[in-house]
Amino acid sequence: MNTTPPQTPAPAPPNPAQYDSFHTARARTDLIARMYAAAMGADYPSEIGASSSCDWPLLGLITSRLSMRPGQLLVDAGCGTGGIGLWLARALALRLDGFDLSPVAVTQATARRPHFLGNNTARATFRVAYLHDTSLPTSAAHGIVCIDALGRAKDRDQAVAELARALAPGGRLVMTRSVRRDATPTWAEQAAAAGLNVEHVDERRGEPGMWERLYRLWITHADELRRELGDAPARSMLAEAEQMLPALPGRRAVLLTLRRPATAPDQAVPADRMATPARHGGRHTPDERTTQ
């Protein structure tokens, strides 16, 4: 297997219908959950059921890095079916605003609120929105999580700037990021352009191995995926696995914590004043993307 990821064309902007199809199909079977559990082992948080690299160690790290107080507002950006944000809202007694580009995922997340919050479902809302256009009020969020979602943004610079705009002074944006090991990250430049400071860069050394195990399970059980999920969702998953597997040995994965200074002005740097994608990571790279 090559140790240097191949250069591939930038992926097309995400298609909500593709994610709708996946979430609809997944709701009919526990096959995907069983594959994630097999890939993560004892670290799989089955209650959350996320279609991402979120495991128990990552949840604990996110909780620590957010440093939020009860009653504050947490935003789950690219929330999928809502498990990560709902778990955090319950664990930390937070209010939650989750958004995703998939209407089906948003509907499923909304339906999951009673499991995590009991009768206090009003503490959490879910809606359709995009990373580059969140519709959040300026300086509204005390904390934001973005797990395995930024890589599918239309423009990552614009997405980070938009999330920074919604972040209250002193608040933190905690997100998963990845880069080729032979590349120099531009996270600090991207953060500075959005008016944020890099507070922590936590290495996730086991993340590439988890994806390799999961992708190989998808390929090994391709016929079962087609039978349980249908042809289109299975085809999309298998194409992702084939594309991403060669890049994994050269992948560096981290949890990045960005903080808006407590003395920062209410308005972050507008997206149209930021550096171009060629300088600060606005382009897609073959090893940083969101999975299904």
Image: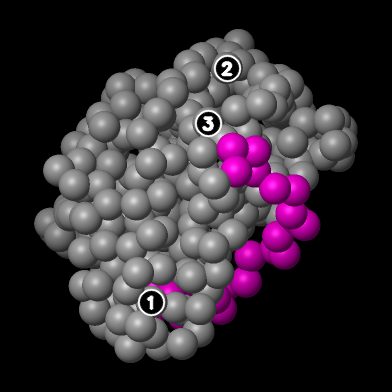
Q: Residue furthest top?
A: 263
> Which residue is labeled 1 in the image?
222
* First of labels 2, 3 by sequence position: 2
Q: Is residue 291 above or below residue 287?
A: below
- Eye-nearest disc, 1 or 3: 1
Q: CA distance from mark 2 to mark 1?
A: 41 Å
> Which residue is labeled 2 in the image?
198
Magenta residues span 2-25
The label number, if any, that marks residue 270 in the structure image: none
- Eye-nearest disc, 2 or 1: 1
Observer-nearest of 183 and 258: 183
> Local crowd at mark 2 within 10 Å, few (<14), some, or many (≥20)?
some
Observer-nearest of 47 and 141: 47
* First of labels 1, 3 by sequence position: 1
Q: Name the secondary structure under disc 3.
A: strand
Q: CA distance from mark 1 to mark 3?
A: 27 Å
The quarter holding residue 30 reads: bottom left
Q: CA distance from mark 2 to mark 3?
A: 17 Å
The label number, if any, that marks residue 252 in the structure image: 3
* First of labels 2, 1 by sequence position: 2
Residue 46 covered by magenta stretch: no
Q: Position of residue 116 (x, y in %)?
A: 17, 53
> Local crowd at mark 1 within 10 Å, few (<14), some, or many (≥20)?
some
Q: Is residue 189 above or below residue 208?
A: above
Q: Name the secondary structure under disc 1.
A: helix
Residue 15 covered by magenta stretch: yes
